[in-house]
Amino acid sequence: MHEAKERNVQKTQRLGNFIWWSYGLVFGLYLFATLGTTLIISQPDKLVPAQTSLLTIRSSFGIVTYYAVLLLVLVFFIAKGILFVILSSRLLFISGKEGILPAKLTYINRHGTPIVSILVQTVVCATFIFILYMLLTGITNFNPITTQQGVPFYLLLRAISSILWILAIILFLAMNIRYVLRVRHKSRISQRGVQIPGRESTWILGLSTLGIVTLLIGMQQTIAHSWIPGAFSNEHWSLTIITCTLVAIVVGWLCAEIPRKQALLTTLRKVNTREQLLRNQLEEAYNEQQILVEQQQELLIAVEQLYRENALAAVTDPITALPNHRAIISALDEALQETSEKQESMGLLFVDLDRFKQVNDSWGHPAGDAVLHEVGARLKKAIGPSNFVGRYGGEEFAIILRKCDVTLAIEIAEKMRLSIMEKPYLWYAEDTSTPVELTITASIGISLTPYHGETREALLEQADRAMYRAKQSGRNRVCIVMAEEHTRQILTVRGLGSFSSEEICTARALLAAMQAYDQETYEHAQRMVSLSEATARRLKCGSEEIHNVRLAAMFHDIGKIGVPNSILHKPGPLTPCEWEVIRRHPDTGRRILARAGGPFAIVAYIIGAHHERWDGDGYPGGLAGEQIPLSARILSVVDAYDTMVSGRVYREAISDEEARQELRRCAGSQFDVNVVEAFLQSLDHLEETSHEPFISQQAS
C-alpha cells in the first residue's frame, strides 16, 4: 500500500512537471516565432504597419548583430513549424496505436522516430497550402507568387495558422481544465487514484482560463483586422480567413476521418473474419457435441427401456400379460388412498374360474394357460381402460373399479361373467387338427368401500367371502356380502324363496347398498313391508301383486343413493334446486331396478310412480287417479304415514292419531280414498292383535 501511494505521488509530480514545461516551451516558441516573423516581414513601403524593421538593428548594432538576430528568429520560426508537425504526427501515432487510424502510422524506425506519421503530417500541411494557393488564384486576381515577392501570401498563411494554432491551444487548455475538474470530483468521492494538490490545481485552472480568454481575444483581433490593408479590406480579410480556416479544418478532418473509417472497416473485417472462424469452430464443436448427446441419449433410452422391461416383468404375469399379485396389492393401496382423499367409493371384484382344475387335468397345463390368457383379455376388454385388472393367483383375477357404486359394480361384474362364458375357448391338441371347445364360467365376489371396510385387508376378505358364497350358491354368478346377516333373513321371510340364486344375490346387493348409504332409509323401507302387505291384502289384491308390493316396499327409496347426504339430511327447508334433486329419486330407483331385470323390472314401474298424487299434482310423471298403479298408491299412503310418525332430521315426529287425521284430510286429493281407508283398517287390525300402537312394535 505504501509503495502504491509513493508511485501515485511520483506520477502526480511528473504530470505537474510535464504541464509546466509544456506551457513554458509552447509559450517561448510562440513568442519568439511571432516576434521573429514581425521583424522579418517589415517592408519599406509599410505594407504591414507598426512593424519594426531589421534595418534599424543593422544600422544601429552592426551587420553581425543583424545576422545573429535574423538567424535566431529563423531558428525559432523553424522550431515552431517542426514542433507543430511533431505534435500533430504524435497525435497520428497515438490514433494509430488506438486503432482509430491505420496501423501503418505507428511504424517507428530504428532510431525510434515515427517517420510515417511525420511524413503524413508534412504531406497534409503541403496539401493544404497547395489547395489554398489554388483557391486564391482561382477565385481572385491575387497572385501570391508575384505580389511583393510572396509576402502577402505568407501573411495570409500565417494568419490562418495562427487561428488554427489558437484553436489547438484552446483545446489543449480546455482539456487541462476538464482533467483537473474530473480529478477534483473523483477525489471528493474517493481518496484513491491520481490527486493534484489544491494550489497547483488552482494555478492550472486560473492560467488555463486566462489563456483561453487571451487566445479568444487574439483570434478575434486576427480575424477582424487585415494584416495586408493594401491587398485585403477588413471585410474581405475576415471572410478569407474564416473560409480558409474552415477549409483547413475540413481538409484535416477528411485526412483523419477517411483513414479512420478505413481502419474501422479493416478492423471490422478482421473481427468478422475472426468471428466467422470462431463460429465455424463453434459449430463444428457443437455438431460433435450434438452427436455425443444423441449417442448418450440413445444409450439412456436403451437403459431406460431395459429398466422398464425389467420393472414391468417384475409386476407382470407371464401367462396373461396382466399385472401380477404384487402389482394388484400396490394398485389397491393407491386406489384406497385416492378414494380416501377424494371421499369417493371404489369396488374390488374377485373372479374365480369354475372347475378350472378339470381343464388342466383333462387337456394339460398348456390348455389351462391358453384359457387364462384369453380370460384375461376378455376381462380387460369388459372393464374398460379406466379400471384395473390383474391375475391374483392360480385361476383367480382381481378387478379394481374406481368411482364405483353397488349398481355399477354389479353391472360390470355381470358384463364380465357373460363375456367369460358367451364364447367357448378353442384348444388345438397336438395330436388333433380339430379344436376342442372349452366352456368356462366364473364366480364373482364384490366388496366396496366404505360398505365393507376401508382397508386393503377388509376388502380382500369380503370380496373373497362373496366369491366363495357365489360358488356355494351354484357357481356362474355374482354375489356381494351383506353388512348384516339380518338382511338375508328378511329376503327369505318376505317371500323371495321362489327367486333364483342370481336374483337373490342382486336383491341382497341392492339392500346392502341402501343400508350402507343411509341406515335410516333402510330401516324405513323394512318397516313399510308389513304395512304395505297388510293393506294389499285388505284391498283383496292377488298373490302376485302382494309379492310385488312387498318388493316395492323394500326398494321404493333405492333411488336416494343418488341424492347427496347434504340434501338428504338437511335440517332446514330445501331450496328449489335441492327439491329438483329430491324429485328425481323415484326415476333413479326405477332405472336401477330396470337394469336388474327379471321381477325387478315390474317393481321398477311401481317405484317410479309411488310419488304420484291422486289429483295429478305428483311427480315425476304427473299421473292421476286410476292411471297410478294400485301398488304405487298403496306405497304412497304407507310411506307418508311412516314418515310422519317416525320423524326426520328436518322435523319432529307426530302422534299416531295426528298422522291418521292427516291421511283422512288428504284423501281424495293426494291419496286414493279407498287405499287410505284400507290402510287405516289394516293399522287398527295390527294394533288389536299386538295390543299396542304399531309404531312401537316396529321400533322395537
Image: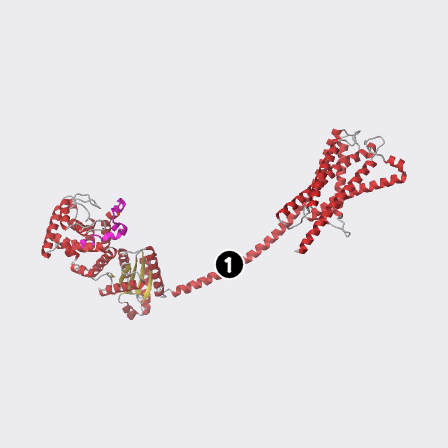
672 relative to 128 in the view: left or right: left
Q: Nearer the viewer, residue 506 or 529?
A: 529
Q: Observer-nearest residue: 155 or 586?
A: 155
Please give the residue where the numbered disc 1 appears in the rendered image.
294
Q: Amino acid at mark 1?
A: Glu
| Relative image position of residue 391 (x, y in whole percent) | 33, 64
Dot 1, crowdedness within 10 Å: few (<14), some or many (≥20)?
Answer: few
Residue 699 place in picture, x, y as percent: 17, 56
Q: Position of residue 184 (x, y in %)?
A: 65, 45
Q: Residue 201, can we see it?
A: yes
**Residue 559 counted in the magenta span:** yes
Q: Is residue 668 above or below residue 496?
A: above
User: What segment carries the magenta color?
Assistant: 550-579
- Residue 504 place in picture, x, y as percent: 20, 59
Q: Nearer the viewer, residue 391 or 372?
A: 391
Reply above or below: 650 against 373: above
Q: Is residue 255 visible?
A: no
Q: Quadrant of the N terminus?
A: bottom right
Tell me, yes or no, whether the highlighted magenta stretch contains residue 569.
Answer: yes
SS under mark 1:
helix
Secondary structure predominantly adopted by residues drawn in magenta: helix
